[in-house]
Amino acid sequence: MNTQTIEKKDFLPLNGTDYIELYVGNAKQAAHFYKTAFGFQSLAYAGPETGVKDRASYVLVQNKMRLMLTSPMHSDHPISEHIRKHGDGVKVLALIVDDAYDAYEQTTKRGGISCMEPKTLSDKNGEVRLSGIKTYGEVEHIFVERKNYNGVFMPGFVEWKSAYNPTETGLLYVDHCVGNVDWNGMNPRVKFYEEVMGFNNILSFDDNDISTEYSALMSKVMSNGNGYVKFPINEPAVGKKKSQVEEYLDFYEGEGTQHIAIATNDIVSTVKQLMARGVEFLKVPASYYEDLFDRVGKIEEDIEPLKELGILVDRDDQGYLLQLFSKPVEDRPTMFFEIIQRKGAKSFGKGNFKALFEALEREQDIRGNL
């Protein structure tokens, strides 16, 4: 019985995030920003010079995290329509699999909607097999099988060499990616991840957990079996004023990826470097730290640097975590980044929700969107 249960859960084994692709208005300039501000390194390029006539894609890397930035070459391209509607935003959350063809079969037969039929790309460095299904909004999951490939990224890309190479900032890998969905959209997406991809709902937060005086939201955290891939799904909840999720949906003009959480082993060092490079972060009041130890207990870190940088702390049964959220990285108040360091904790900072959302509301108010 246990064996059958394990087999049922593991019909879609995932080994982590392969890359995240953003559709952006100007990939060349966006690549410069992510190198300068976040310390990503040049990895690969595809575009007209490599035989790809309709778009240009720059791939950046930092440790185990790969970011692809793609822009179209013409205004009538579907990518242009995506950017016109949403602004810069996540299009692909690509997942590492052992067998891309089987991943496609397993998910589509369970109701997944295809966005890429299985295909094999090959060159002198071997082959990469790809397939994909749709998820919330216009976001796609591409399954990437690269065990038989030794090239820089995948066929169709060439090594991207640059004389401009700012140092890394200690970013390690994707910890989780959060999706914002419309009113009453959370449970259908939870069902999708459970039934189509074999995920489990590991945490749930309702409007009693995530609310302030003015606004509220609900969230469920979906995780694959080994915990390498986690997708919290947010939807708005009724409040006195417009919630951050509603603001996102208004300005993104639809459902999409709200933020990308990136792990670090030294959040103080990472955040100091990011701030020095111009990354802007949300700030909580100094009063947040007055009863910090009463709320989270003993931690290894000195409280003064945390207070200076605005880093939040929370604890669960397995340890604690430190986290900080950037302001949106484009003019529309949509996508942002989270920097997270886990000291055993498996949760997502429930104890920080109130302080975080009040900080978000201060920003909303400044923009006139609360």
Image (cartoon, rainbow, N blue to C red):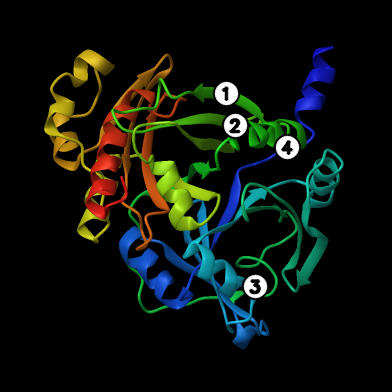
Say which element carries label 3: helix
Residue found 14% across the figure and 40% down from its top? 308
Q: Which of 158 and 247 is in front in this view?
A: 247
Q: Residues within 10 Å of mark 3 (few under 14, many from 20)?
A: few
Looking at the image, residue 35 sits to the left or right of residue 194; the answer is left
Residue that numbered label 2 is attached to: 222
Residue 78: mark: 3
Q: Mark 1 points at which residue?
A: 202
Residue 244 sits above or below residue 203 on the image: below
**Residue highlighted by disc 4:** 197
Marks 3 and 2, how far apart in space?
Answer: 30 Å
Contact? badges 2 and 1 (CB < 8 Å):
yes
**Residue 49 image position (x, y, % from top left):** 60, 87
In the image, which disc is placed on residue 122? none
Q: Distance between the residues labelled 2 and 1?
A: 6 Å
Query: What is the CA distance from the residue labelled 4 to the residue labelled 3?
Result: 27 Å
Residue located at (76% from left, 37% from top): 196
Tell me whether the residue at label 1 lies in contact with that at label 3, contact meaning CB atoms closer than 8 angstroms. Answer: no
- Mark 2 and mark 4 in contact (Cβ < 8 Å)? no
Please report the residue visible at 75 percent of the width from the left and 74 percent of the height from the top. Answer: 124
Q: Where is residue 189 in the image (x, y as percent from the top left)?
A: 65, 37
Q: Quadrant of residue 210?
A: top left
- Packing grade of label 4 (10 A; few <14, some 14-19, many >=20) is many
User: Disc 2 or 1, which lies upstream in sequence?
Assistant: 1
Three-letter code for the amino acid on which mark 1 is drawn: Ile
Q: Which of marks 1 and 3 is nearer the N terminus?
A: 3
User: Compared to 243, does 194 lie above or below?
Assistant: above
